[in-house]
Image (cartoon, rainbow, N blue to C red):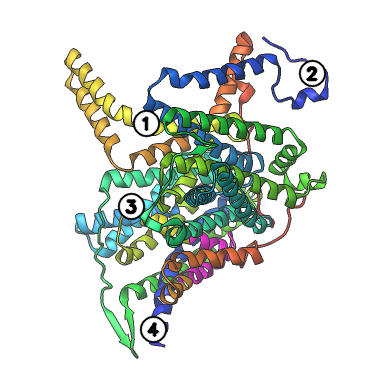
Amino acid sequence: MRFLFKTAYQQDIRLFRDGVTAMWYGLLAVAVLLLPAVISGYYVGEITWVFIYGICGVSLMVLVGYTGLLSLGHAAFLGIGAYAHAYFLQHGVPWVASVSLAILITTASGITVGLPALRMAGIYLAIATLAFAVIIQEVFTRWEKVTKGFAGMAVDKPVIFGVHFNDNVSFYYLCAAMLAIALWLTRNLLRSPTGRAWIAIRDSEIAAQSMGVNLAVYKSIACAYSAALMGLAGALFAHKIAYLAPDIFSILLSIQLLLLVIVGGLGSLHGAVFGAIFVALLPPIIAILRDSIPATLSDVAATTGVGLIGALGKAIGDFLKKPGVEAGIFGLILVLVILLEPLGMYGRWMKIRLFFSTFPMYKRHTFRRQKSYMKSERLR
Amino acid sequence: MATFLQLTLNGLAVGCIYGLVALGFVLIYKATELVNFAQGDLLMLGAFVAYMAIVLWGLDYWVGFLIAVAVIAIFGAVLDMTVLRRVIGQPQFAVVMLTIGLGAMFRTFASVTWGSEIYTLPTPFSGVTNIAGVTLSHQYLSIIAGTLILCGILYAFFTYTRIGIAMQATSQNQLAAYYMGIPVKTIFSLVWAISAGVATAAGILLAPVTLIDINMGLAVALKAFAAAVLGGFGSIPGALVGGITIGLIELYAGATLPDGFKDTAPYIVLLMMLAVRPQGLFGTLGRKKV
C-alpha cells in the first residue's frame, strides 16, 4: 500500500501525482513509440484511429464530462474541421496554416452554437445541437462549390515543412503527437481556475454562480475549446479517411462519440482514451470474431464429435455477418455500461486498482451507489 | 390557392404524426422525467408488428391495429419494469444515452428479424375525395382523424378516470403521490405502455405514407423531438402544436424553397425560436429555488 502525504497545496494540481505516476506515463510513451516496430502495418493503421478518436473523446469529455453540457451534434464540428482543412489544402495552403485555419473556423462555429445555447438547459441543448448538426450535414451536401457534395472530396497525405507523412507509421506518430498535445493542453486547463469553474458548473450551476463563476463566459470557453479540439481531430480524420463524403458526419457518428465518452468513463481524461480504444478497436474485433468463432467451434465440434457446437458457431457467425448487427452490439454495450458501471471503463479500472492497493482490506461497498431518489429538474 | 390548401392538409397530417410521437415523449417526461429517444424505434416496431398481423397472418386491419398497439404497449411496460426503472434519478443524459442504446438494439432486432426490405401495409383508407379542386387523400384524412380521436381518448382518460387523475398527481409530485397511496411504480409502467401504444398507433397511421422499413422511426423521431422542444418539453398541447408547426413548415418549405430546405427548415425555425424563447412555446421559465 502506498500513501500519498500532501504537504503543500500545489500538490493537488501537479501535472502528475508523484514520481511513480510520472514514470508509468513515461513507460507508456515509450511503448507507444516502439509499438509500430512490433506490429504489422494494418494494425498500426487501426491504432491510429485510437489517437484520432482520442482527440474527439477529449473534446467531448470537456463539454459533457467536465462542463455537463450534452451535445448530440459533435460530428458537425468534426465535419467542419475536416472539410475546411481539405478545402484549404486543395488551395495550396501549407499544412500548419491549414490546420490552424480549420481550428479557427470550428472554434468560431462552436461559439456561434454556444451563444444561444447558454440560456438552454439539458434536453433543449441536446436538441439544439442536434438541429445544428442536421443543418450542417445538409450544407455539406448542398454547398458543392466547396465540399463537392456527394461526389466526395479527396484529401492528400499530409506534408509538414517538407516532411512527407506518406505511410501508416509516420502518420501514426503524427496522430500520437497531436493526441499527446491535446491531452497536455486539456490537463493544464483542467488544473487551472478554468477547469475548476467547469467542474463547478457541471455539479451545480446555481452553486457555481453563487461562488462567482461567470456562467456565460465559462460555458462559451468550454464550447469553443471543445470545438477547437474537434477541428484538430477533423483535420487528422480527413487525412485518415482520405475521401470525404457528407454522409460520414451523420447523427450516428455523434452518437458514437457520446458512446465513446460514456463507455470510457465520464469526467476523466483517462476515460476519453479508454473509450477511444474501445470505439476504434471494437469493429476490427467483431470482424475477427465473425470468422474465428465458427472456425474455432467447428474445430471443437470435429474433435469432440458434438455437432451442436459446430452448428452454434455457424449460427453466431451468420448472426454477426448480418447488416446492422454492429450498431446493435454498440447499443447493448451502452445499455449495460449505463446500468451496471455508470463510471465506465475508467471507473472499473479505479476499482481494480483500489483492490490491489488495499489488497486484503478491499470492500465492495466502497463504491456502492448511494440510493438515489428522483431529483426533479422541473420548476413547478 | 388549391395547392396551398393541399399543402396545408398534407402538412397537418404529417404534423399530426410528429405531434403524436412528441406526445409520447412528453407523457413519459412529465411522469418520470426520463427522455425517451427510443420512441421512434417503438413506432417502427409497432408498424412491423401490425404488418405481421395484417399481411402475414391475414387478420382484419382493425384487429391487427389493436394487436399491434397491445403488443407494443405491453413491451413498453416491460421495458420500464426491467430497464428504465433502474435509472430514475440518474443524470438526464445517462438516460438519453440509455434509450439511444435501446433504440439501436431495436433497429438491429428489426433488421435481423425482418430484413432491410421495404414493406407496404394495406389500408382501408385508399381513395381520394375532390372538394372544390382540392384533392383530399383519405390516408391523410385518416391520420388527422386518428390523431383527433386519440387525443380525445387521452384527454378523457386523464381528466375523468381515477387512474388518469392518479397519473396527473404522480407527475406533479411523486412523493406526495406515494403518501396518498398511489402505486407510483405501476403508474410509471402504465405511462410507458400508453406512450408506446400511442407511438404504435402513429406508426400504423404513418405506414401507408412512408412505407415500413427499419429506419422509418429514426426520421420521424428526430422531427418529433424538434416538435416537442418547439412546444416546450413537458407541455402536452405544446407537443401537438409543435408537431403541426413542424409538419406545416416542412411541407411549405419543400414546395417553395430550393432543394434541401424541406428537411432543414424545421430545424432552422427551431434554432431561431430557441434563440428567442429558450424554454419553447409553452414551456415554463424560471430557476430552481435552492
- Which percent across, then down, holds residue B261? 45, 68
Element under disc 2:
loop
Does residue B243 show up magenta in the picture? yes
Q: Which residues are magenta?
A: B224-247
Whether B100 is drawn above or below A350: the answer is: below
Q: Residue at x 42, y 17 (%)?
A: A38
Q: Secondary structure at mark 1?
A: helix
Residue type marked 2: Lys
Q: Nearer the viewer, mark 2 or mark 1?
A: 1
Q: Which residue is mark 3?
A: B214
Q: Position of residue A188 (x, y in %)?
A: 70, 33
The numbered mark at residue A284 is: 1
Circle 4 Cα neighbour tier, 10 Å, few/some/many (<14 / 14–19 / ≥20): few
Inspect the image, locate mark 4, and give the three-letter code of the amino acid beneath it. Thr
What is the distance, in whole Å, between disc 2 and disc 3 at their CAs? Answer: 57 Å
Residue B275 figure quarter: bottom right
- Give the amino acid type for the residue marked by disc 3 in the picture: Ile
Q: Chain of mark 4?
A: B
Query: Decide: marks 1, 4 in contact (CB < 8 A)?
Result: no
Secondary structure at badge 4 equals helix
Do circles 2 and 3 both sit on a common chain?
no
